[in-house]
Image (tube, coloured by chain):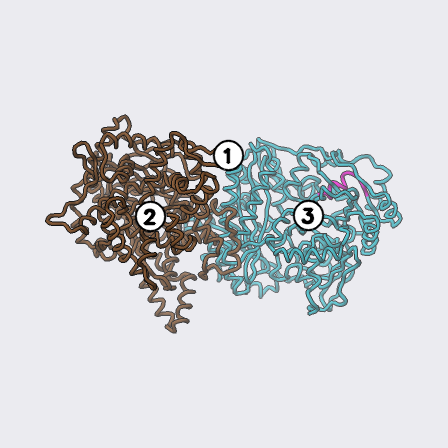
Chain colours: A brown, B cyan
Amino acid sequence: KACTPNYSPGRGWPTSQTQDGFEDILEERRNSSDLKYALRCYAPVLYKGVTPCKANMLKNIVLQSDQLRYVINQVSQESGEAPDIIQEEASVILEEMAHRLQISTVRFFAFALSKAFKTLFQHVCVNEEGIQRLQQAIQEHPVVLLPSHRSYMDFLLMSYILYTYDLALPVIAAGMDFMGMKFVGEMLRMSGAFFIRRSFGGDKLYWAVFSEYVKTMLRNGFAPIEFFLEGTRSRTCKSLTPKLGLLNIVIEPFFKGEVFDVNLVPISISYERILEESLYARELLGVPKPKESTSGLLKARRILSEDYGSIHVYFGQPVSVRSLAQGKVNRSTYNLFPRHIPRKPMEETQSFVNDTAYRIVRLQEDNMVLKPWVLMASLLLQNLEGMELSVLTEQTVWLRGLALSYAAFLDWPDHAPTAKVVSSSLALHRGLACVSGGRVSLVVGEPLGPVTPEEALFNRAVSVLSCASYRNQVLHVFLRPAMLAVAMHTAASSKKNEVYNCFSFLWDMFSNDFILCPGDTVQDFEEACYLLVKTGAVQMPQQDIVMTDIGQPTLSFFNGLLEPFLQGYQVVCRYLCEEASEGLTEKQYIPAVRSFAHSVLCVFTGNLRCYEVLSSDMQKNALAALLRGKLPTQKALLARL
Amino acid sequence: GLFHLSIVVLCPPLTSDSISTVLAAATITMKLTSTVCFPRQEIMKWNGWGYSDSKFLFNKKGQAEFTGKRYRLSGMVLPSLQDWFENTFGASVNHKSPPALNASAVPPASLNEAFVEDLKATGIPFSHEAEDRVFRAHGHCLHEIFALREGKKFERVPDMVVWPNCHSDVVKIVELACKHNVCLIPYGGGTSVTSALECPPEETRCIVSLDTSQMNRILWIDEKNLVAHVEAGIIGQDLERLLNESGYCTGHEPDSMEFSSLGGWVATRASGMKKNVYGNIEDLVIHIKVVTPRGVIEKSCQGPRMSTGPDIHHFILGSEGTLGVVTEVTMKIRPIPEYQKYGSVVFPNFEAGVACLREVAKQRCAPASIRLMDNEQFQFGHALKPQVSSIFTNFVEGLKKFYITKFKGFDPHQLVVATLLFEGDRERVLQHEKQVYDIAATFGGLAAGEDNGQRGYILTFVIAYLRDLGMDYYVVAESFETSVPWDRVLDLCRNVKERINRECKERGVQFQPLTSCRVTQTYDAGACVYFYFAFNYRGLADPVHTYERVEHAAREEILANGGSLSHHHGVGKLRKEWMKESISSLGVGMLQSVKDYVDPDNIFGNRNLL
């Protein structure tokens, strides 16, 4: 049975779209043989302009390309090494990088993952219309798949779904970390992953091999290319500021006329419960990330005994780069330079790619399926001392209405009484929240034996951050009105332009923490006004913005929603003003600000409960905001906060 | 029958004014043996391409025929054309869209009486008859021919036509035009495809079409220097025929050479099919005489190359009638080649063909002509094969097809053909031929015979007639061209075709359009690419508008892919909007300042180019 989410169609903004219904692909797996499924006939439709070629022929095409030969000669001249030796280096790089996609490995994964998914998840839901659109797009143009990244599971899941629907299997850009897992790394390679070093800053040769490899696959229509715009898994479940390197690479063949068009497909993968939930919280608090290893993976088997709810995968509308670039980028500026010589993209192109990246991430956000629990988590985090179950239920219902009127893609079970929805959410997330004596509160891990105050704080922070990773999933829905609510609260008067100035200040400050498209301040402000007016929380007589009689609950919820961020930034500022010495390096910054935050939290456990400032993510974003220099001096910032 | 009828309908009873014209015509045609006579509409279509006696039609049996006696294809039955036509366009020979005859709807002439008086005194023949004026109000753009066929009214047509007989007649006319502030539009062969002959609707002065057709003599031939001095109104085929009589040729053969004039070639920077041997028009001219409102421009000597500042010829070449009238040209001639041989090569796909042409260009061994037709054009060419009478020929054809598709594994829907023309002395031609076929072989090319090659070139001359046939059955068609660096040829061809298909779909064209291209010229650094584009317009309210939007999009695509605004058709008014982008606003300013100096009152007011 398809699980169809509730949604309210279009809110009149360009990013919104009508969302489709879902189909559970695990249902058929529960009723028929996995082995048959893994061995069934697989004959996907291909790109109409495909140049048929095997994975190892690809390597030759890349090594013999004009592009690579040019860079090899250049590097050879600069280093004094013979071109043959550089060529050999290039070949080694390519060997280390290249995938060896083969259907037998994919079949193995199809079998193994069927078993694992059935144990772990209740449903894996996919929007079928999206699949049909994708199938059409694959035939017409080279396709780039751009999924959100929340879990290691993402790319296996993607390939699994594409195999299930008989679509062309993608090649996937993956970080080198996986290569640490001997056997598994090779398995992933054979299922289509190609591996890129995390950093290769100035290495011209590496860049040339890498970009030519990706472009060759794109131009020849070898397979859809998949990568994560966010660059890494988001530990906070907020979307991350997109990275532009790979996007630049896949878009360039269009600008150079080597392909007619490129289609970008935003894909939103939403997990009801993330496998890495508490790992992420610990990582953010400074516990090092466990190194990827095969034995680690085997230990992780214990997760197989838990229930992780459902996964929703939404394949968005393919976005044509050609249509996007219409009127924004003049392709003829590429006419006067040989196409095989690498060149830094022009300013016009760079800002186009940047803007495109942000819009795609916003599309990913818009199509994320939200569960009731994310609403409950948002409420619980504003009531850390705990709430009456009945109050929680009542407020969740209220928040649901608000979310729906802001076009949140909410998966609220049909025809189930609210109390049942709340209790089953609590049951699934019993590791995070518990009910005792009719009160709901966060679960804090209780270590055996005596606890130091630091350990207690750490445990408390783990549970807050874990819970925050659910609240964060709904932030994109509320972000703009919430910033407006805060701006109204802080502005000296209710004059529209003063409120806008405050809004714009917050917008700039938070642009590392949230996905705010560059240059959209005014548009976002208007959207926020529109939404708050629409839900009756605010009215705008003449040049003023004022709260209505019934606006109090909404505005105070929004103020509370952003409070952890405001407090967190404040602590960072205080640290920089009070403690930081001259010559502080970025490396020293994180531990120093963490211990400062610790001390602040230990002293003021009463009124200052911004556990989230302990998160390295927030610390980095706050610093970046200050470094961007767009903001006033630290003191002025502190004053305004 | 239809077209003869039209002429009868169009020819009004002789009036005293038109008698002088016809008399003048009679004397001139007696004196000269010109192919295109004075009132051209007597032998040429007024609302389509070429000679009135030559046209395609579907006969009562539904088979295609080409009428007349002028071409190799004339009088033949083409059994496969109907199938190809119906399958390619989704058209049917039962759905006819014949022309509506309504050429009398011509805006009345607004004459400058003082100019007419002074002109009469010179004795230069002129006319303001409706059919003379309409005939010279257009070139051969789709929208122009379509309007004629539909009987649509032209917003503006020339108010009168003058026929100067020599250089000094032109000097007189230009002087009078300046004196009376009359707008002059030079008219050569009338084969423009850039709206260059269209009268600017906003022009309020009297517009005079200056028809150069009577200036058609070869004034002298200099065999020591191998140059000929020729009046610029001469038509390509006449020039070639007259020179041939003396054992020479210019070798300049643009596809329009049956009708286009020497002055027109200079004014548009024309290119000839055999430019690899003889050069393009800018390589052929040694001296040009131009009458402008400021006076006559010419050089003082015939030195083969000069370093005397920027070459003033290059202001004239491509000036598109905006600066003055080209009256006389000294151009290079060559002895007629001893031996000519056609040839053809089949390649498995377009990529292989382009790679071969690139290699040929690299080795600088291109034959007089080398052209690569894509698969669509190859199939089109096949549809034009005349009925084969002998069973044996049929058998041989079948065998050839079997060899190429089955034995060599070529996909009939992928294979392309290059047509070749070699010229020179026999021995060298054979040697040259071997060299080219050897190169072709390294790209998987198979020699496919002389006949296929020759047929490719015949297609060139009849293609414009085919457009008229298409228009009889709801199909509109047009061609356009560009030049592009070698490394971008394939990308440009693919992207432009795709863009056309996509635009047609978005604009509601119900049937898959035909998009086809061929590489028609090779250069050291790039190639000339020629596109054909046609679609069935049934169900469209304004097919010409749709067509124009699609062509516009195709040109944008060409420019975005590194192609030029034009290789040889020119800019006219059709592509003016892209001039700034193409040559920079400073470049446009330079041209404008020349125009302002040479023609401050905009006497040559066709508004082309700038």
CA gap between label 2 and label 1 equals 54 Å
Residue occupying the point 50% across, 34% down? A542
Comparing B56 with B145, the one in front is B145
In this figure, which residue is indicated by the disc labeled 2? Answer: A170
Residue A256: x percent and y percent?
48, 54
Q: Amino acid at mark 2?
A: Pro
Residue occupying the point 78% across, 53% down? B215
Residue A340: x percent and y percent?
45, 60
Q: Amino acid at mark 3?
A: Ala
Q: Nearer the viewer, mark 2 or mark 1?
A: 1
Q: Is residue B437 left or right of residue A109?
A: right
In this figure, which residue is indicated by the disc labeled 3? Answer: B196
In this figure, which residue is indicated by the disc labeled 1? Answer: A542
Q: Chain of mark 3?
A: B
Stretch in magenta: B127-137
Residue B84: x percent and y percent?
53, 40
Using a 10 Å C-alpha cutoff, classify the residue at mark 2 as few (fewer than 14 neighbours), some (14 to 19) or many (20 or more): many
Q: Farthest residue toward the left?
A: A449
CA gap between label 1 and label 3 equals 58 Å
Residue A149: x percent and y percent?
31, 47
Tag 2 near tag 1, CB within 8 Å: no
Q: Quadrant of residue A313?
A: top left
Q: Amino acid at mark 1?
A: Gln
Tag 3 near tag 2, CB within 8 Å: no
Q: Is residue B524 left or right of residue A391?
A: right
Q: Chain of mark 2?
A: A
Q: Is residue A244 left or right of residue A122?
A: right
Asked which secondary structure carries label 3, the reply is loop
